[in-house]
Image (cartoon, helix red, strand yellow):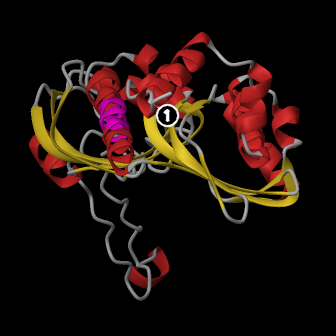
Amino acid sequence: MSRIACGMAVAAWLAAGCPAGAQAKDKAPEQQVVESLEAAVNAGKVADASALFADDAVVTAPESATASGRAQIDAWLQSLASGAWRMDSGNRQVSEGGRVTGPTSISNEGARRLGVAPLDGFVEAVVLGGKIRSLTVRFSAAAQLRLTQAKAKADETVARSLVEGVIGKGDLSRADMLLAGTFIDHDPAPGKTGDAAGFKAGVTDLRAAFPDLACAIEDVLVAGGRVAVRGVCTGTQQGQFMGLPPSGRAFRAGFIEFFRIADGRITERWGSRDAMKMVDQLGLAVVAPAAAPAVAPTATTTGKPAATPAAAPGAKPGEKPKDKKSGWF
């Protein structure tokens, strides 16, 4: 039989399908271990996947710190199950030292939510004695770039939604979707708590004073789950603000907001406004505290009744000046 005829005969036999047992026997034991791991991960079977690792194994994978030892690897596998990970590999190669390598495509809940799944990557495992001693899973450079860009865009959308939708339009229902349960406001409004409830209460008071409040974003910077926003707020004082009655005056002042974002929700906030410009435009008097004399004048030292301090503009007789400092303005 000629070489060509022989090749055609082999191809026909392969096309007809060789027995599954024969195919399995042709695979190296190390390759079978890696395939079993992939099947267990795809099925969300944490215990089955864990049994394939040695007690001192080390795992390096995307979006997680390096895991070493049984406890950390089990926690990592549980996170994969929670994130509905799926790995589909092919063309695995087995080399000296029990090293198994090959390309893979990876899908998980985060990538699906961002619209970039599946992501192509690469898997490398070292299998000795039927156990995985080390495992490395990584995205390709192109896939990592797609993921990073998608995350940055999503984080910017969250920050814009809070500034423009919640603060700028008063949509407090949107705040419940944007703020994490562990949200911390490092610059809360005066008298408000530094949690989500305090933030919403601050927005409510601000919009009661300025019903036409609007916030226009001019610059956004995004880096690794942190978003900085710069812009301008405008509004007309139609309600009580900082203890003073409505003035009917308008203001235009710059603002800066800084957020930390994780898993699509804001975990921390810092913020400030151009308070001096706002106070000046609204005609709010800021009373500087008078320097205390070396010896306070009394009826004993002067022979006259002690003078009563002048009240701040708009304050009732005997009322102390209000503190103008605020985490918002």
* Front-most of residues 4 and 49: 4
Please say if 161 is above or below 313: above
Other residues around mark 1 within 10 Å, as few (<14) / some (14–19) / many (≥20): some
Q: Can the viewer see residue 179 in this picture?
A: no
Magenta span of residues: 150-159
Q: Can the viewer see residue 70 in this picture?
A: yes
Main SS category, magenta section: helix
Q: Is residue 152 magenta?
A: yes
**Residue drawn at (58%, 20%) of the image:** 14
Q: Residue 76 falls in which quadrant of the image?
A: top right
Q: Residue furthest front?
A: 1
Q: Residue 27 falls in which quadrant of the image?
A: top right
Please say if 39 is above or below 285: above
* Front-most of residues 125 and 62: 125
Q: Is residue 110 magenta?
A: no
**Residue drawn at (79%, 45%) of the image:** 29
Q: Which residue is mark 1?
A: 105
Q: Residue furthest bottom?
A: 294
Q: Could you tell me residue 110's position as x and y percent?
A: 51, 30
Disc 1 marks a residue whose amino acid type is: Ser
* Front-most of residues 329 and 5: 5
